[in-house]
Image: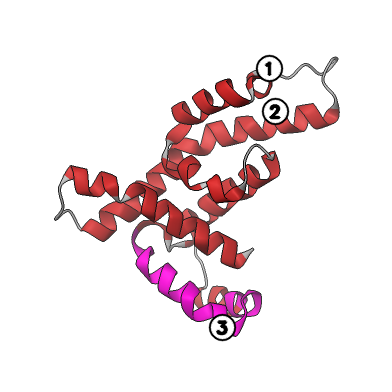
Amino acid sequence: MVVNLDNYLETLKEDLEPADLESFLALAKNTSGGWQGAKGRKKVFMFLDALRDSGIINMFQSVDFLHSGSRWLIKYLDLHHPELLEDVDEYEDTSLEIERKENMQYLIDNADSVRDVIIGVVLAKTKGDDSLERATSQMRPSAGEMVKLWMQVK
């Protein structure tokens, strides 16, 4: 997929207030390796949009959902919203219940690839110079930067 960077930057200028543009660019520069490109950003933004639409959390809690992967998400749902892990029953479920379950399935299916985007950001930041423990400690802060960026655009 080829992205016209000039067009993308113009769209950002239209979407953001001038005062917010500078802080947005600083955040984007800090997350440039691994998700600054359109494919990574789109995947993360779509995931965050689906997470918001699910209504299972306050979006200030979304950081952990970006870097934890599908196994963690399934455990979270099993503990807090077990009904969303049940199979869709087209005869018994309402259209809203079906939509929520399908949204959950999308989140589960994409949680690992979103986590991989976070890993890409961390690896780009550390440039392979840091220890595994240091790189692991950067997962949550990197996810937090992405959520801030998403919130600024939204």
Residue under the point 55% across and 73% down: 8
In the image, 126 versus 60, the foreground residue is 60
Rounded to the nearest whole Å, what is the CA distance between mark 1 and mark 2? 8 Å
Q: Main secondary structure of the magenta part?
A: helix
Residue neighbourhood size for the residue with mark 2, other residues' Cα within 10 Å, grouped as few (<14), some (14–19), many (≥20)? many
Splitting the image into 4 quarters, where does residue 55 fall?
A: top right
Name the residue beneath numbered marker 1.
Answer: 87
Mark 3: give few (<14), some (14-19) or many (20+) Cα within 10 Å: few
Image marks 1 and 2: residues in contact by CB distance under 8 Å: yes
Name the N-terminal-most of marks 3 and 2: 3
- Residue at the outermost bottom position: 18
Locate residue 145 relative to residue 122 in the image: left or right: right
User: Is residue 76 depicted above or below 87 in this figure?
Assistant: below
**Residue displayed at 55% across by 31% down:** 108
Mark pair 3, 2: CA separation: 39 Å
Residue 19, quarter of picture: bottom right
Which range of residues does the magenta coloring cover? 11-33
Numbered label attached to residue 19: 3
Does dot 2 land on a helix, a strand or a loop?
helix
Q: Position of residue 66 (x, y in %)?
A: 47, 44
Residue 136 location (% of width, % of height)? 27, 44
The answer to whether residue 1 shows anywhere in this view is: no
Q: Is residue 131 magenta?
A: no
| Helix, strand or loop under label 3 | helix
Q: Earlier in the sequence, mark 1 or mark 2?
A: 1
Marks 3, 2: nearer the viewer: 3
Within-10-Å neighbours for mark 1: few <14, some 14–19, many 20+: few
Q: Amino acid at mark 1?
A: Asp
Q: Residue at 48% across / 47% down in the picture?
A: 63
Q: Amino acid at mark 3?
A: Ala
Which residue is label 2 attached to?
101
